[in-house]
Every structure is written in structure tokens, then in C-alpha cells.
Image (cartoon, rainbow, N blue to C red):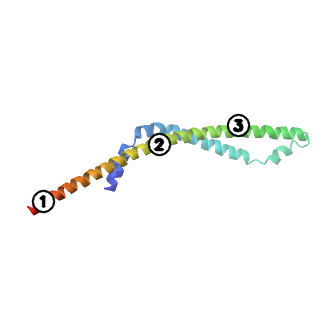
Amino acid sequence: MIARTILKVASQIPWDKVIERAPSVAEKAGTLWKSIRSKNKRLSVDESMVYSSYSTELSESDLLKARLDRLDERVESLEEEIQASSGLIKTLAEQNTSLVQRIELQRIRLIRQSLLFAGVTAVLAGMIVYLFIR
């Protein structure tokens, strides 16, 4: 009974829409994952090593300016990452909403069928009792 209900619910899911959007979700997730991995590798370089080579040639203000430029680049990359992740989240939320709506329709349909079955069972039980009494 439960397996049949699960199969029925699964058959009502708009798989064409899910499959249609799956490549874009996978692409966005892959892009997001690659950007996170590449940024983690770039951040693993010790900044003291980068700035130590310039310490003899650049003044303190030049070092601060270079560091500020790196921070600006990092902020821009984080903004791009946020935009990519928000697009992915939006797509996943749309798919989730669609699936929840379908499941809710199936739940309501199951309740109606259960009430109908209970009513038919009550009528049949009443008819059986009537036939035995008669």
C-alpha cells in the first residue's frame, strides 16, 4: 500500500521539468564548486611570502595599497560567488516548490480517497448487517 502510494506520488512529479532544469543546476553547482576550490588554492599562498619580496623595494604605503588591491579582488570574487550560489539556490527552490505542490495535491487526493473508501465500507457494512437482520 505504501509502496504503491510512493510510486503514485513519484509518477505525479513533473520529471520533465526536473530533468529540463537538471543540467543548469549541475552546471551552476559545478561552476560554484570550481570557483570555491580555485579560490581556496589561491588563498593557501602565504601573504607574507608574497609581500616579503617587495619589502625592500616598496614603502609601507605601497604594501598597504597592494594589500588593498588584493582585498578588492577578493571582494569581487566573493560577490561573483554569491551571485552564482544565489542562482543555484533559486533554481533549487523553484524545483522544491514544484515538488512540494505536487506532493500536497497527492496528499489531498489520498485523503479524499480514504474518506470515500471509509464511506463505501460503512455502507457495505450497513448492508451486510441489514441482510443478516432481515
Q: Which of disc 1 and disc 3 is earlier in sequence?
A: 3
- Mark 1 → mark 2, Cα distance in angstroms: 49 Å
Amino acid type of the residue that numbered disc 1 sits on in the rendered structure: Tyr
Check disc 3 and report the residue beneath it: 76
N-terminal label among 3 and 2: 3
Residue 126 placement, left or right of 100: left
Location of residue 88 (image quadrant):
top right
Q: Is 51 in front, or is 62? A: 62
Circle 2 crowding by C-alpha within 10 Å: few under 14, some 14–19, many from 20: few
Disc 2 target residue: 97
The residue lying toward the viewer, choosing from 102 and 51, is 102
The residue wearing badge 1 is: 130
Q: Is residue 133 placed above or below 33 in the rendered structure?
A: below
Q: Is residue 99 left or right of residue 36?
A: left
Label 1 near label 3: C-beta < 8 Å?
A: no
How many other residues sit within 10 Å of disc 3, few (<14), some (14-19) or many (≥20)? few
Kind of residue indicated by mark 2: Thr
Earlier-in-chain disc, 1 versus 2:
2
- The image shows residue 60 at horizontal and vertical percentages of 90, 41
The local secondary structure at tag 2 comes to: helix
Q: Amino acid at mark 3?
A: Glu
Residue 116 x/y as whole percent = 26, 50
